[in-house]
Image (cartoon, rainbow, N blue to C red):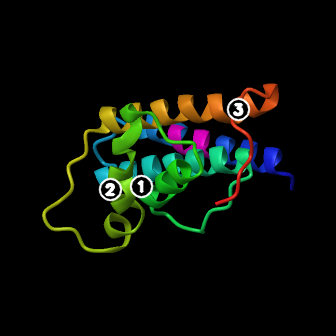
Amino acid sequence: MRQREQALVLMDKARQDEGLVREVLHAEHIADELIGFHCQQAIEKLLKAALTAWGVRYRRTHDLRELMDVLTDTGHPLPDSLESADAFTPYAIVHRYEAIAPPVTLDRAGALDMVRRVREWAETQVHGQDTGQGAPAQSP
């Protein structure tokens, strides 16, 4: 699969995670950990979509800070308003697979807003490649 196609697949998968979160955002029977997990997954896929669109290689990881560092190291830093996106990393593993005490409390609306903001940024990066306005592809 070509890098552009792969970037678009990742964007689509991220939209699916975001859509699921929208559907269950106010459902009290859905645990915050599950909402956080799908927010983390959406952000991860969005970061990987941007990296893929630029042709930047990255290690297979769920660590959002690592992906954000690769972005910065290759000249594609996230805007300051998105720097706290890495706070969702624990939802990928710790909150997903380990016992939690005390229970996690998530600002669900704030989490969904972060996903939206990362998506909007990623869309400009991925689609900027279509018009030649994105940054040139680089390797770490």
Q: In the figure, is residue 129 to the left or right of 47?
A: right
- Whether the residues at callouts 3 and 1 have beta carbons within 8 Å, the answer is no
Looking at the rendering, the stretch of residues picked out in magenta corresponds to 14-18
Q: Earlier in the sequence, mark 3 or mark 2?
A: 2
Q: In what quadrant of the picture does the N terminus appear? A: bottom right
Q: Residues within 10 Å of mark 3 (few under 14, many from 20)?
A: some
61 to 114, vertically: above or below: below
Q: Which residue is mark 3?
A: 134
Percent coordinates x, y for residue 48 in the rendering: 61, 52
Q: Secondary structure at mark 3?
A: loop
Q: Residues within 10 Å of mark 2 (few under 14, many from 20)?
A: many
Tell me the residue at 48%/51% (across/down).
Answer: 68
> Does the segment drawn in magenta span residue 48?
no
Q: In the figure, is residue 112 to the left or right of 134?
A: left
Percent coordinates x, y for residue 117 in the rendering: 46, 30
The amino acid on which the numbered mark 2 sits, given as a three-letter code, is Glu
Can the viewer see residue 31?
no
